Image (tube, rainbow, N blue to C red):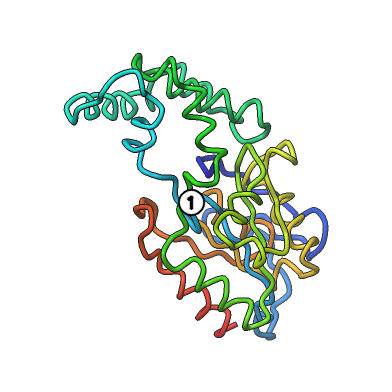
Amino acid sequence: MTDHDHLSTPASTPGPGPALPVLGPEGPIRRGPVSRRPAPPLRAVLFDFSGTLFQIAPYSARIRAAVTARELDDATMDEVLTGLEAGLSDPEVVAAQQGRDVSAKAHRHAFTTWYASVPLLAPVAEELYEQLRTPRYWLPYADSGAALFGLRRRGIAVGVVSDVGWDLRPTFAHHGLDGYIGSWTHSYEHDTEKPDPALFLHACEQLGVEPAETLMVGDHPAKDGGAVGAGLRAYVLPSGAAPGAHRGLAAVTRLTDAG
């Protein structure tokens, strides 16, 4: 899943592209060459998954689908949702989030520990996690398809770079969007998570583009915005958009037009 906080500021960029300068609080510590050339045109866009192109179905609907042994009235559901909110600061849950996206096992452990922090959900924690892996529980944002189509029409390559614990291709295929994607970079397959430059550089290599020709689009300032540490450009969306809402992705196609 996407996508929660840590920053890395490498002194240089491994792999393709020039080394990036070491930055102090006010800017580069060492003066480098001054380029008068404009930035190269964008040839590729990388998208985050959750909160950017897709959002999971509402928790209340998912919980009612999992808890079949009893009827959950609105008051009980409110208690459950309050418990999930409180669970985010539970020390055991917090500890389980460390390195959550570096493996399928760690990802499952992180989420089932959180679900199980609510007593009513403990017996169905595994079922709730399986919902994450089930394509029908994910909803594309209203403008995701149009944005992907617009990029393809412009000849812009598209990849997905996601902190996640399972293969996303079946979810995109379920919604008829897999054909737009030319590269899949799942954090759990690389034993690391964003903003590790290796993930962004891998996606660029797969698409045959340079980092400077690539835009990363996501909803997390540190993880997705961290793509700049690998030499990419980044566009960060506000977080918290409801499932099925318009996400503002038309701005991405406009950015590719502007170069």
* Residue 255 drawn above or below residue 224: below
Q: Camera-side residue: 257 or 69?
A: 69
Name the residue located 47 percent from the left edge and 29 percent from the top edge. Answer: 128
The image quadrant of residue 205 is bottom right
Q: Amino acid at mark 1?
A: His
Q: Position of residue 43 (x, y in %)?
A: 69, 76
Q: Position of residue 179 (x, y in %)?
A: 67, 65
Q: Position of residue 46 (x, y in %)?
A: 63, 62
Q: Position of residue 241 (x, y in %)?
A: 36, 55
Q: Camera-side residue: 179 or 84?
A: 179
Name the residue located 69 percent from the left edge and 85 percent from the top edge. Answer: 37
Q: With 176 as the anchor, is 56 left or right in this view?
A: left
Name the residue located 38 percent from the left edge and 32 percent from the top edge. Answer: 65
Please give the residue where the numbered disc 1 appears in the rendered image.
Answer: 220
Q: Secondary structure at mark 1?
A: loop
Crowd class of label 1 (few under 14; some 14 to 19; many from 20; radius 10 Å):
many
Q: Camera-side residue: 256 or 30?
A: 256
Residue sitting at the far left: 75
Name the residue located 55 percent from the left edge and 40 percent from the top edge. Answer: 134
Q: How many marks?
A: 1
- On-image quarter of the N terminus: top right
The image quadrant of residue 34 is bottom right
* Residue 98 drawn above or below residue 255: above
- On-image quarter of the C terminus: bottom right
